[in-house]
Each structure stands twice: as C-alpha cells, then as structure tokens.
Image (spheres, rainbow, N blue to C red):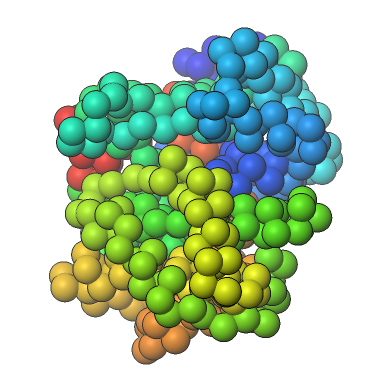
C-alpha cells in the first residue's frame, strides 16, 4: 500500500469518494482525477456508480437510527458489513471507469451516519457523531489507502461536525463576480453561499431543514414499502397543500434557530413522518395532499433560510440545485416560484454531476487531508479551529 507521503508528492492522482447520505439509498462512488491541491485543485470526473443497498441491509441500517431498535452488537457488526459494501462500491466504480485497482491512489469515505448529536444549549448530552463503514475494511478489501472520519475532529473542537462540503464548494465553484448558492437537497437540505470574490473565510453554509427525508418516509409507510420515494414528485403533483398543516410544521424550532446549525433524522426522521400521517388522518387530509404539503414544507424551509439569514446581507445571482431533490419536479416548481427572479438551476446545467457531487467532495477532502490542509470552516460549523 502506498504511503501517504508518497501520494502527497504526486501532482495528479486518481481518487475515489464514497458517500451514503441520510436517504440511505445506497453508496455513491465517484472516481475523479485530481490535479493539485488547495486553491489549485482541478478535477475531472472519470466515472460515477450508485451502489444500492440490499433491502435487508437497508432495513438493518434503519434499525440503527432508533435507540429502541439499535443494539451495540448490531452496530459493531454493521460497521464492518457496511465497510464491505463501501469497498464493493469502490471496486465497481473502478471497473466502470475501465481501470485497474492498482491505478487508484486514494479513497475518501464519509461512511454512513447512524446518529448525530451536535452541540446544543441545554441539550443534556455529550455532543458526538457516529459514522459506520469501517475504513480499515475498505482499505483491506481494495488495497487502497483510505481516509475517513471527516466529522469527528470538528465536533471535538466544539463544532457542529457539519456541513463538510462547503470547503470543497469554495475550491470548485468560487468566482470573482458572481454570488452563488449551492443548494443540496438530500435527506436533509443544506446550502453553501459563496460571495463574489470570496476568501475561504467568507463562505457561509448551513443545513436549511428537511430535504427528501420526510417525503421518503411517508411514501414508504403509505405504500407499505412499495414506493421508497415520490418519483419526480408525481404523487405530490396530484395533491393540494394543506395550509394549516404547513403552517404548523413551519413553527418547528430548527427553522427559526440561528446558524450555525445542523439537523438530521433525530428531528425530521421516522417519528416526524409518523406524526405527520396521524395529523393528516385527524384532519381528513388525503395521502396525495399530505405528500404535496410535505413537498411544500421542504421548499418553504429552504426559502425561509435564505429570507432570514442570507437575503438581508447578500444579493444571490444564481441558485444551483444538487442531490435527489433536484429530480423532484414538484419541489423544483415550488422553489422557482418562491425565489422568483433568482434563477434556480440544476447544477448539471454548468457541467457538474448533481448525483456525484457529494461523493466527489469526499474524494477532494481526502486529497486535502494527505496534504495537511484543514477542511472544516469554523465560521460555518462554529468549531474553535
């Protein structure tokens, strides 16, 4: 296995980024060629592969999200099992690129978050985070040096441990004369704002609230597992928004909380979905109307974040959407109406793969790590360093 010192001396590297997000659809694997590091970073996407979880593995992961169904022995086993799945995803993307394993220099793996407890005043817990998908297993199965555990150092320094992608967004999307917002809509939605002519210390970022997470959970429950998400937003398109439910959900304390802030399944997961279904039943709200209202809820929480925290200080020229939410046409329609004169565009429109973006980020973060560059942004996460 190559030493990290040797790797750092290479001007051009082939690096794989591995990511499984809060939607738990599977492992996204991006194989990129990286030239340089830091502000000189240039990348080319060579291949992208989405490696689905087997149904039984996905179900076991979901059991780990809930303290009532999670067990320490299961966490221990799943850490290694998910490591094997991540390794399989890495091998698959190498084959898709038509390359040999020996040609790959490095892997950066986010792992699978199963619990995230960011600092919160009066929370009564130790701030902490846990991602599984053992990097030693990935390294052993592939023979490729593997960098992981990207979140824990930021939390150790008092930060939120998220978001981590803004540093990469700055390296790849900064510009001299345009202020751009990079809005990711995965299970959770988050935004990176890069002001025109920004230094890295000028970048702002935060979770904005739920993305696809509640919609996916409700679709799964309503269809008894037959539908895991609202394909292209077609089901929501058939319904009407229940304004009373929407108004109630918009009172959630996360939405008005000032950044830096992060969220996850602990706030917007299965419990929220079950409660939303019960609220809809109590008010005789039809299933399509419920999903339409949840879709509007995601859009409204995204817009509300900009209205409260960004628009008073910045004029945004474009908003680029990435993540699975960009495929939900009903959600995209809501966003275009809410943002009016500001173009809301898929990030693919500027030649960058929406589906691969998060995985690409962890390949870049791994490259930065072997060069000794800190990649968290303290003004974003509230870490001390």
User: Above or below — where is 221 with respect to 233?
Assistant: above
Q: Is residue 232 visible?
A: yes
- Residue found 39% across the figure and 64% down from its top: 249
Q: Quadrant of residue 284?
A: bottom right
* Quadrant of the drawing holding the C terminus: top left
Q: Is residue 36 visible to us here?
A: no
The residue at 49%/78% (across/down) is 242
Residue 230 found in image quarter: bottom right
Residue at 71% across, 35% down: 59
- x and y, in percent, of residue 248 in the image: 36, 67
Image side of residue 210 versus residue 204, left or right: right
Q: Position of residue 260 (x, y in %)?
A: 24, 47
Answer above or below: position of 354 versus 289.
Answer: above
Where's residue 300, x and y in %? 39, 72
Placement of the N terminus among the 4 image quadrants: top right
> Residue 239 versus residue 381: which sits nearer the camera?
239
């Amino acid at each position: 296995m190559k030493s990290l010192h040797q790797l750092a001396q290479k001007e051009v590297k082939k690096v794989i980024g591995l990511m499984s997000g809060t939607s738990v659809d599977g492992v996204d694997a991006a194989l990129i060629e990286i030239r340089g590091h830091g502000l000189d970073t240039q990348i080319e996407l060579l291949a992208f592969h989405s490696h689905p979880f087997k149904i039984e593995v996905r179900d076991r992961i979901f059991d780990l999200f809930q303290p009532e169904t999670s067990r320490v022995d299961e966490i221990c086993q799943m850490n290694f099992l998910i490591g094997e799945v991540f390794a399989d995803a890495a091998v698959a993307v190498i084959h898709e690129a038509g390359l040999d394993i020996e040609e790959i220099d490095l892997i950066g793996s986010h792992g699978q978050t199963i619990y995230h407890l960011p600092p919160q005043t009066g929370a009564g817990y130790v701030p902490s985070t846990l991602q599984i998908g053992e990097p030693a297993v990935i390294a052993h199965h592939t023979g490729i040096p593997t960098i992981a555990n990207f979140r824990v150092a930021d939390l150790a320094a008092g930060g939120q441990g998220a978001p981590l992608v803004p540093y990469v967004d700055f390296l790849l999307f900064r510009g001299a004369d345009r202020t751009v917002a990079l809005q990711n809509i995965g299970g959770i939605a988050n935004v990176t704002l890069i002001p025109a002519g920004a230094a890295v210390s000028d970048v702002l970022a935060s979770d904005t609230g739920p993305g696809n997470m509640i919609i996916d959970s409700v679709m799964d429950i309503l269809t008894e597992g037959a539908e895991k998400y609202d394909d292209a937003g077609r089901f929501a398109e058939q319904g009407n928004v229940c304004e009373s439910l929407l108004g109630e959900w918009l009172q959630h304390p996360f939405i008005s909380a000032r950044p830096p802030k992060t969220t996850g399944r602990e706030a917007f997961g299965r419990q929220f979905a079950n409660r939303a279904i019960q609220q809809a039943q109590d008010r005789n709200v039809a299933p399509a109307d419920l999903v339409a209202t949840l879709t509007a809820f995601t859009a409204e929480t995204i817009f509300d974040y900009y209205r409260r925290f960004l628009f008073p200080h910045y004029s945004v020229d474009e908003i680029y959407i990435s993540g699975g939410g960009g495929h939900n046409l009903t959600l995209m329609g809501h966003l275009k109406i809410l943002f009016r004169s500001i173009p809301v565009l898929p990030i693919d429109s500027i030649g960058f793969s929406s589906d691969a973006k998060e995985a690409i980020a962890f390949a870049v973060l791994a490259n930065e790590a072997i060069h000794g560059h800190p990649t968290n942004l303290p003004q974003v996460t509230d870490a001390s360093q």
